[in-house]
């Protein structure tokens, strides 16, 4: 697809099962490959079933890459009809056909007598994940999941299309973010209100889309025999190592350990700005009224300076990033028609990462690139794993890879700034870590409420959101902008696209802070553990992945308190 920013990439290993040149947009070409795998399975002995798994992995990776390529093209060009058509064709005509066939192959594997002779240590995680796949699959859910994906695409298309006219120029909402860092308070308020009002114009559409998603998800959970979508989602997400009750304890730990620091930082900010009260447009500006940090003017400057950070941090990581640049696996600049946000997508057959983001010249852009590069390093570290499911770790650990890289990379911000500004950027980042925990708790707790209150009204949903904002929202004064506060969750794409995928960021942030703490005691050892843990991919259970990185998989107050104190000490310094 010529809309992709990168050229054609070869498979990491030559195909031995999937024919070359196959059209993965044509189910009639794909179906015989599933037929062959299904027919072969009963005839396999123990070595044969392992070879069969590798052929299945090859097919799954090729299909995954096709899906990723179409998604990348669509998100890079939400205003391109050809890209949208190609993506929706795959979602509507290929993915629904794949799901039941993957289910049947999982059944064939789990029921195969030779499976019991395979190494339990090697295949424990695969067996566990396959059992969940078989347990949850329902044919009647396939069209519902297709509709869910299409509604998510509509949300992205609408979000990506929003612009405002600011002082005579059309700006995307992402581009408007830089004005919230301007010392001129009147300008900040003007920019903030313009964006907030633009979002409010679409509030009805966002609510309608979410209501449709909610109904679909409740039907999906019911079809699978679950009393609530929350219980279904926890099972589907493979949350074997923590429960909804653990999430509640995490929220409580944030309230007890993090919120006092948030209030302390906001009180300092209010005093430094000389204000009676903080308003929403006062939260991103430098409290000393210094000009905004401008780490770069052109995106290529950001790319080159980030390369220097990795050169200083670790030669192996630096080479991986250099390879991505050479293969044009980066699309980083914000533009109209580009979907919001940032992500790293793995091209599963080439076993190479692609980074997508919307850079506009903010320090946050540098943090985002470091973050997504951490995901990319994870994909590169697991390239040698031939079993496709094991090249993908649980999200809770994927985010350790990315958040650790933010903290480790920030040690070298002098490639972007003079020393005083580098320290200022590091302080901003650490304050951001403190401030993101309450938002994570808010988003996660909101989803717990949503999916355990079937049949709720929009009014009740809004009340639940506002109650959480009171609990975790800090001291900002929203007087006159109550409607914007009530609909603030519309901007959080995870609520629309990936239900319950958000607490992972908080769990992982605790892991990343542990990696950072370890690096301060000994960078070489911490980096070695970090890279070794990434190389495990998803082949080990979550607590073992954390342990390999030198971290505890525990996210209550006993783990949180010393890490919060470390951040407070660093902020004081």
Image (cartoon, grey):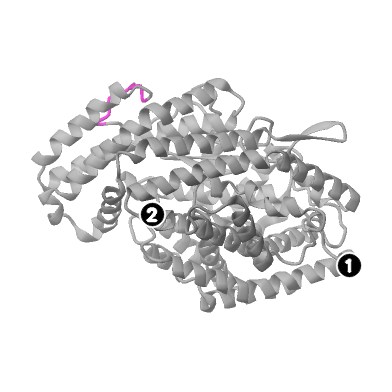
Which residue is rendered at x = 75% and y = 62% of the image?
423
In this view of the protein, which residue sits in the foreground, 27 or 554? Answer: 27
For numbered disc 1, what is the local secondary structure?
loop
Is residue 436 visible in this depiction of the protein? Answer: yes
Answer with the quarter of the image where residue 16 lies: top left
Residue at image mark 1: 276
Question: Decide: marks 2, 1 in contact (CB < 8 A)?
Answer: no
The location of residue 204, given as percent across then percent down, is 65, 40
Image quarter for residue 119? bottom left
Residue 397: x %, y % from top left: 45, 58
Q: Residue at x 15, y 49 (%)?
A: 111
Q: Kindly tell me whether residue 551 is visible in this rendering.
A: no
Mark 2: few/some/many CA within 10 Å (<14, 14-19, 20+): some
Q: Residues within 10 Å of mark 1 (few under 14, many from 20)?
A: few
The residue that label 2 is drawn on is 232
**Residue depicted at x 47% and y 28%:** 87
Kindly report the secondary structure that dominates the magenta region of the rendered protein.
loop
Quadrant of the image for the C terminus?
bottom right
Q: Is residue 167 magenta?
A: no
Indicate whether residue 18 is drawn in magenta. Answer: yes
Q: Nearer the viewer, mark 2 or mark 1?
A: 2
Image coordinates of residue 468 in percent, x first then y, are 63, 63
Magenta region, residue range: 16-24
- Give x and y (percent) for residue 145: 41, 39
> Would you identify the image quadrant in which residue 101 lies?
top left
- 52 relative to 470 in the view: left or right: left
Q: Nearer the viewer, residue 438 or 483?
A: 483
Could you tell me which secondary element the residue under label 2 belongs to?
A: helix
Q: Is residue 549 above or below residue 1?
A: below
**Which residue is at 65% across, 66% downward?**
472
Counting residues from the start of the chain, the first of labels 2 and 1 encountered is: 2
Left or right for 572, reference 146: right
């Amino acid at each position: 697809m010529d809309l992709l920013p990168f050229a054609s990439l070869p498979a990491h290993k030559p195909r031995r099962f999937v024919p070359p040149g196959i059209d993965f947009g044509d189910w009639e070409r794909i179906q015989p490959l599933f037929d062959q795998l299904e027919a072969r399975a009963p005839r396999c002995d123990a070595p044969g079933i392992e070879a069969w798994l590798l052929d299945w992995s090859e097919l799954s990776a090729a299909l995954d890459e096709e899906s990723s390529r179409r998604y990348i093209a669509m998100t890079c060009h939400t205003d391109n009809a050809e890209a949208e058509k190609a993506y929706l064709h795959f979602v509507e005509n290929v993915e629904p056909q794949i799901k039941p066939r993957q289910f049947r192959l999982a059944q064939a594997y789990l029921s195969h007598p030779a499976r019991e002779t395979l190494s339990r240590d090697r295949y424990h995680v695969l067996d566990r994940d396959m059992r969940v796949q078989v347990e949850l699959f329902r044919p009647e859910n396939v069209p519902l999941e297709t509709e869910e994906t299409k509604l998510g695409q509509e949300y992205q298309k609408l979000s990506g299309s929003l612009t405002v006219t600011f002082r005579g120029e059309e700006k995307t909402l992402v581009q408007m973010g830089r004005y919230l860092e301007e010392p001129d308070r009147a300008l900040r308020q003007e920019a903030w209100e313009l964006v907030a009002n633009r979002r409010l114009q679409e509030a009805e559409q966002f609510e309608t889309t979410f209501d449709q998603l909610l109904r679909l998800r409740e039907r999906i959970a019911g079809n699978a025999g679950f009393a609530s979508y929350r219980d279904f989602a926890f099972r589907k997400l493979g949350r074997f190592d923590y429960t909804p009750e653990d999430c509640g304890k995490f929220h409580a730990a944030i309230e007890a350990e993090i919120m006092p620091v948030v209030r302390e930082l906001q009180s300092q900010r209010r005093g430094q700005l000389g204000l009676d009260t903080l308003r929403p447009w006062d939260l991103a500006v430098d409290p000393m009224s210094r000009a905004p940090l401008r780490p770069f003017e052109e995106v290529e400057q950001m790319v080159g300076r980030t390369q220097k950070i990795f050169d200083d941090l670790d030669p192996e990581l630096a080479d991986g990033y250099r390879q991505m640049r050479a293969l044009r696996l980066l699309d980083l600049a914000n533009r109209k028609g580009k979907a919001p946000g940032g992500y790293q997508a793995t091209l599963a057959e080439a076993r190479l990462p692609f980074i997508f983001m919307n850079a506009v010249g903010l320090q946050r852009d540098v943090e985002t690139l470091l973050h997504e590069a951490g995901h990319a390093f994870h994909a590169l570290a697991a390239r040698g794993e031939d079993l496709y499911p094991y090249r993908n770790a649980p999200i809770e650990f994927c985010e350790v890879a990315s958040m650790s890289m933010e903290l480790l990379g920030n040690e070298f911000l002098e490639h972007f700034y003079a020393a005083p500004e580098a320290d200022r950027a590091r302080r901003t980042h650490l304050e951001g870590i403190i401030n993101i925990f309450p938002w994570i708790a808010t988003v996660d707790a909101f989803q717990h409420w949503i999916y355990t209150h079937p049949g709720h009204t929009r009014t009740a949903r809004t009340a639940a959101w506002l109650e959480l904002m009171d609990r975790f929202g800090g001291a900002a004064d929203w007087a006159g902008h109550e409607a914007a506060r009530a609909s603030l969750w519309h901007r959080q794409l995870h609520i629309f696209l990936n239900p319950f995928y958000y607490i992972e960021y908080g769990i992982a942030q605790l892991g990343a802070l542990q990696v950072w703490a370890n690096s301060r005691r000994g960078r070489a050892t911490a980096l070695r553990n970090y890279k070794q843990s990434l190389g495990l991919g998803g082949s080990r259970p979550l607590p073992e992945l954390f342990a390999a990185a030198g971290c505890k998989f525990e996210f209550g107050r006993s783990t949180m308190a010393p890490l919060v104190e470390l951040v407070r000490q660093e902020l004081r310094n």
